[in-house]
Image (cartoon, rainbow, N blue to C red):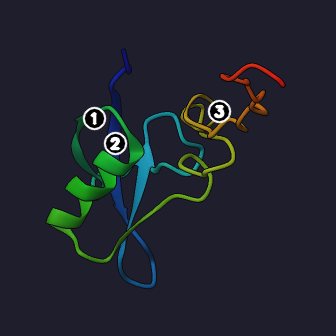
Amino acid sequence: MLKASYYYLCPRPMGGWILHKEGCVNLLKSDKRVFIGSLYTRQQALTVAKIHHANATMCSVCLNNFICPTTSSTAIKPARAATPTRHTPRH
């Protein structure tokens, strides 16, 4: 079962919003950040964030595809080679 995490939206200096997960080094402790909820996946968090602010984007540090712990468990595994089986007798 997935563990819920806290997600926040922070305003960007040049406009727009950036989505952070609690514990991110780039998450500001300012009054301007907005708590969007306790959510299970980063995609779920982005969906909720875009409801509030359509121009929200994910943080490249805490919500990066390459460091997300869920990517290894959901990776597509290569198929095993099939072994042919003869169902009729040889002549």
Q: Tag 2: Cα neighbours inside 10 Å, few (<14), some, or many (≥20)?
A: many
Image quarter in which the C terminus is found: top right
* SS of the residue under disc 2: strand
Between disc 2 and disc 1, the foreground one is 1
Q: Tag 3: Cα neighbours inside 10 Å, few (<14), some, or many (≥20)?
A: few
- The residue under label 3 is which amino acid type? Ser
Between disc 1 and disc 3, the foreground one is 3
Q: Which image quarter: residue 1? A: top left
- The residue under label 1 is which amino acid type? Leu
Residue at 15% x, 64% y is 51
Earlier-in-chain disc, 3 versus 2: 2
Residue at 78% x, 27% y is 83
Q: Residue furthest right?
A: 91
Distance Cα–Cα, label 2 vs label 1: 7 Å
> What label sits on residue 72 in the rendered view?
3
Residue at 68% x, 23% y is 88
17 sits left or right of 52 in the view: right
- Look at mark 2 in the image and give the residue it sits on: 7
- Look at mark 1 in the image and give the residue it sits on: 39
